[in-house]
Image (cartoon, rainbow, N blue to C red):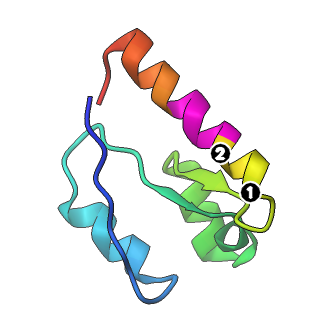
Amino acid sequence: PYVIVCNHQASLDLMGMVEVIPDRCVPIAKKELMYMGTVGWACWLSGIIFIDRQKREDAIHVISQTARTMRRENVR
């Protein structure tokens, strides 16, 4: 398993990054994207993991849970 860290400048950059990242790679995005209408639906349907950056503990929990799943199931 591996993690790719990208520093994108705008919310819509994520849609372009999805085209260049390897198959079976799931992006993590800020929860605010979920509420952006069509973009939010597209992100949700494509399996993006959303984190709430305003609640630090919740974000850490989601990322930790994702990392444990990656190691346990040996997935990328």
Measure the C-alpha gap from mark 2 to mark 1: 6 Å
At which x and y percent is residue 2? 26, 37
Residue at the spot of label 1: 56
Res 1 quadrant in image: top left
Residue occupying image coordinates x 32% and y 62%:
18
Q: Nearer the viewer, residue 52 or 35?
A: 52
For the view shown, which residue lies furthest in the top direction?
72
- Most prominent secondary structure in the magenta stretch? helix
CB under 8 Å between callouts 2 and 1? yes
Q: In what element is the residue under mark 1? A: helix
**Vertical placement of 58 versus 30: above or below?**
above
User: Bounds of the magenta span?
Assistant: 61-66
**Vertical placement of 35 versus 11: above or below?**
above
For the view shown, which residue lies furthest in the right direction?
55
Q: Nearer the viewer, residue 53 or 13?
A: 53
At which x and y percent is residue 27? 43, 53
Q: In what element is the residue under mark 2? A: helix
- Neighbor class of circle 2 (other Cα within 10 Å; few <14, some 14-19, many 20+) is some
Q: Is residue 42 left or right of residue 61?
A: left
Residue occupying image coordinates x 39% and y 12%:
73
At which x and y percent is residue 75? 32, 22
Q: Is residue 47 left or right of residue 76?
A: right
Residue occupying image coordinates x 58% and y 74%:
39
Res 51 quadrant in image: bottom right
Residue at the spot of label 2: 60
Q: Nearer the viewer, residue 32 or 23?
A: 32
Q: Is residue 66 left or right of residue 2?
A: right
Residue occupying image coordinates x 22% and y 42%:
23
Tell me the quarter of the image containing the C terminus: top left
**Vertical placement of 37 versus 57: above or below?**
below
Name which residue type carries label 2: Ile
Q: Is residue 53 magenta?
A: no
